[in-house]
Image (cartoon, rainbow, N blue to C red):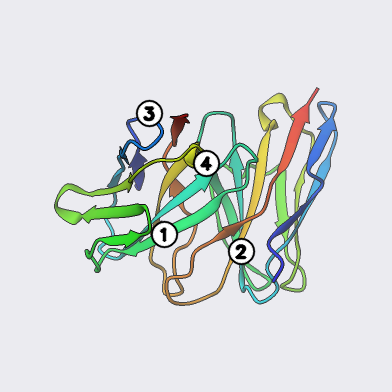
Amino acid sequence: AQKVTQAQTEISVVEKEDVTLDCVYETRDTTYYLFWYKQPPSGELVFLIRRNSFDEQNEISGRYSWNFQKSTSSFNFTITASQVVDSAVYFCALGEYSGGGADGLTFGKGTHLIIQP
Amino acid sequence: DTGVSQDPRHKITKRGQNVTFRCDPISEHNRLYWYRQTLGQGPEFLTYFQNEAQLEKSRLLSDRFSAERPKGSFSTLEIQRTEQGDSAMYLCASSFLGGNQPQHFGDGTRLSIL
């Protein structure tokens, strides 16, 4: 069975600090996808990034970066120089491969990130 | 390019009543997904469609729940004989078929059972 663990329930930092959100996953599949989504107070889940199991290259997008390590089954998310607008709940999700892409995703419980001005 | 649209945004009903939600996916997307999210939890997968075919159902989808996507476009999720435990946010998502396409979510329908 698939499982995603986000051990940090809530993180509070002061604006401009760097912050890392942890994600550990479990799967028996050799091919799978990992995702991060942002859920601001308005409620809509916003897609941030997708990673394939066969691509361990880390990625940077502006202030966001992602560290994927198959050896530790982790897919961590770092925000550099955090801003108040980054305040949201962040979800890590796991999808298995079924020929046409990920099917139903398995989500973690989320990390509530609070950026204080 | 409009996003995923869900209707209604909020539904309040009495226990035992039937409710139906609608989801309009992004127009070119082949796949449509339903999830349920309760307070403080991540979304939980319920079911998904590839065009009009329902390909997978979670064990969370009891026999009181039924979903359809009759023409491969919009979808409906019906809950019969609602119970207190059905109170949640019901999320719809859609994606392209193939490759590594991400799922794009709607704003959800919040169901409150009195």
What chain letter is assigned to the residue under label 3? A
For the point 82% across and 42% down, the residue is B19
B95 sits to left or right of B20 = left
What chain letter is assigned to the residue under label 4? A
**Residue topped by disc 2:** B94
Indicate which label's residue lies in the foreground, 2 or 4: 4
**Cα distance between the residues tagged 3 and 4:** 13 Å
Which residue in the rendered view is the most extreme toward the left? A71
Asked if disc 2 and disc 3 are in contact, CB closer than 8 Å, the reply is: no
For numbered disc 1, what is the local secondary structure?
Answer: strand
* First of labels 3, 4 by sequence position: 3
Indicate which label's residue lies in the foreground, 1 or 2: 1
Residue A13, disc: 3
**Residue topped by disc 4:** A85
Residue A69: image quadrant is bottom left
Asked if disc 1 and disc 2 are in contact, CB closer than 8 Å, the reply is: no
Residues at marks 2 and 4, common chain?
Answer: no
Q: Amino acid at mark 4?
A: Val
* First of labels 1, 4 by sequence position: 1
Asked if disc 2 and disc 4 are in contact, CB closer than 8 Å, the reply is: no
For numbered disc 3, what is the local secondary structure?
Answer: strand
**Residue topped by disc 1:** A49
Q: Around disc 1, counting alpha carbons within 10 Å, would you say few (fewer than 14), some (14 to 19), or many (20 or more)?
A: some
Q: Amino acid at mark 2?
A: Ser
> What is the quadrant of the N terminus of chain B in the image?
bottom right
Relative image position of residue A34 (x, y in whole percent): 36, 56
